Image (cartoon, rainbow, N blue to C red):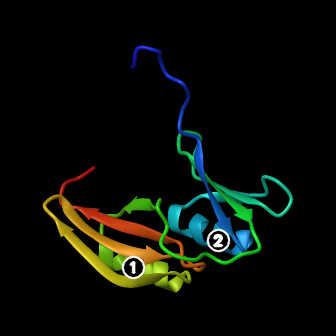
Amino acid sequence: MGVMGILGRFAGVTVDCQNPRRLADFWSAVLGGRVTESLPGWRRVTVDDDTPVLTFQPVPEPKVGKARLHLDIAVADADEAVDRIEALGGRWTSERHDYPEGIVLVMADPENNEFCVVQYYYKM
């Protein structure tokens, strides 16, 4: 703990999107969470009480350019995860990175928001 103490805790990530319902349903299936309406038109995915939430905020404009923030999803089998994500409406960008600790596959959700599937070589 720093000199001034803890300021707060990580509570969640909010994603701007055109179709909050579609993205919440996608991410709920990927993470095994439940979907609720947090505000009219907004959707929230909650996995459990100890995990930060994902909130989907409606905006009129589509995503443009590369995101400067993305989620990393740790999986036991990257190939299996890619197949499941594609069946849910996501896609693999064909970008793969091999690191000493594991492999990273860059994916995109149904609105083209990038995220990574990470298969570590050691158990987390």
Mark 1 highlights which residue? 82
Q: Are marks 1 and 2 in contact (CB under 8 Å)?
A: no
Tell me, for residue 23, which label it has, or none: 2
Q: Amino acid at mark 2?
A: Leu
In percent of width and height, residue 98 lies at 19, 70
Secondary structure beneath dot 1 equals helix
The mark that comes first in sequence, 1 or 2, is: 2
Tell me what residue is drawn at x 73 percent, y 74 percent: 19
Q: CA distance from mark 1 to mark 2?
A: 17 Å
Kindly indicate the quadrant of the structure image that contains residue 74.
Answer: bottom left
25 or 67: nearer the eye? 67
Q: Amino acid at mark 1?
A: Val
Specify the farthest residue to the top.
Answer: 3
9 or 33: nearer the eye? 9
In percent of width and height, residue 2 lies at 39, 19
| In this picture, residue 43 sits left or right of residue 80 | right
Tell me what residue is drawn at x 40 percent, y 60 percent: 72
Q: How many C-alpha atoms fall within 10 Å of the one at disc 2: few (<14), some, or many (≥20)? A: many
Q: Quadrant of the N terminus?
A: top left
| In this picture, residue 101 sits left or right of residue 36 | left
| In this picture, residue 7 sits left or right of residue 35 | left
Secondary structure beneath dot 2 equals helix
Which one is in front in this view, the residue at disc 1 or the one at disc 2? 2
Tell me, for residue 19, which label it has, or none: none
Q: Is residue 81 visible to us here?
A: no
In percent of width and height, residue 78 lies at 31, 73
